[in-house]
Image (tube, helix red, strand yellow):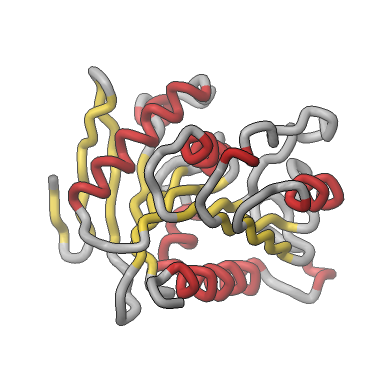
Amino acid sequence: MVNVRDRIEWRVPVGTETTAAVYEPATAAGRAALFVCAHGAGGHMDDSAMQKLAEQLRGRGIGVVRFNFLYREKGARAPDPMPRLMDCFAAVAAHARREIQAGPYLIGGRSMGGRAASMLAAEGFACDALLLLAYPLHPAGKPEQLRDAHLARIKVPVLCLNGTRDNLCRRDLMDEVVAGLPGKWTMHWLEAADHGFHVPRTSGRSDSDVLNEIGEVSERWRSCLLPGR
């Protein structure tokens, strides 16, 4: 473990291997949540999208753990099979929970990383809630191949944020899926945003506006998870 100011770096064992992870505490005052946040298929723990997201959430009372899936730690581009992704996520999340005293305890992430977290939660992995960003409901151009079979088994509260132009999550299909889910699933649509949360100039919005909206919505949702709320 390396502690540099407000940044704690770990090497986390995953079976016979290890991966990198970093914890950065919330910068906002008050009781903080802990969010273990996984990157998407083409990203990594230190890509600009992950860093901007972490900065936004930390200012909203959510401490963030970022980590690399094993394939990215090795410098590979092709993602591991889902069971291996889930094993890596579970190892990092369990390590973070042992090391950091905070609550509520959230898991999730961007795109593929959020999907891995949702599958863990569906299998009963202990957490207080799920925070999913750009959930990939289906592959691009293949809306008939829905990735929703496990979602009904998730028992904890969920906040899912997707852009209205996300080519991996057609809005009408996602709304239909969510309508049939039991439990506390909160779906929030980010107007004009694509899968990477980018917006066109013609929308009258900026990428920063979208990031701020993610922060505001996440902060309100997090506050509802606290005891007595």
Q: Is residue 8 left or right of residue 150?
A: left
Q: Residue at x 45, y 23 (%)?
A: 76
Choose top left, top right, bottom left or bottom right for residue 208.
bottom right
Q: x%, y% of residue 213?
A: 61, 72
Choose top left, top right, bottom left or bottom right for residue 67.
top left
Of residues 7 and 224, the one nearer the viewer is 224
Q: Is residue 204 left or right of residue 51?
A: right
Q: x%, y% of residue 198?
A: 68, 59
Q: x%, y% of residue 178?
A: 73, 50
The count of marks equals 0
Q: x%, y% of residue 188?
A: 68, 63
Q: Residue at x 47, y 54 (%)?
A: 129
Q: Residue at x 40, y 71 (%)?
A: 226
Q: Is residue 33 above or below residue 9?
A: below
Q: Is residue 2 above or below residue 220?
A: above
Q: Is residue 40 visible?
A: no
Of residues 58 and 73, the one nearer the viewer is 58
Of residues 103 and 19, the one nearer the viewer is 103
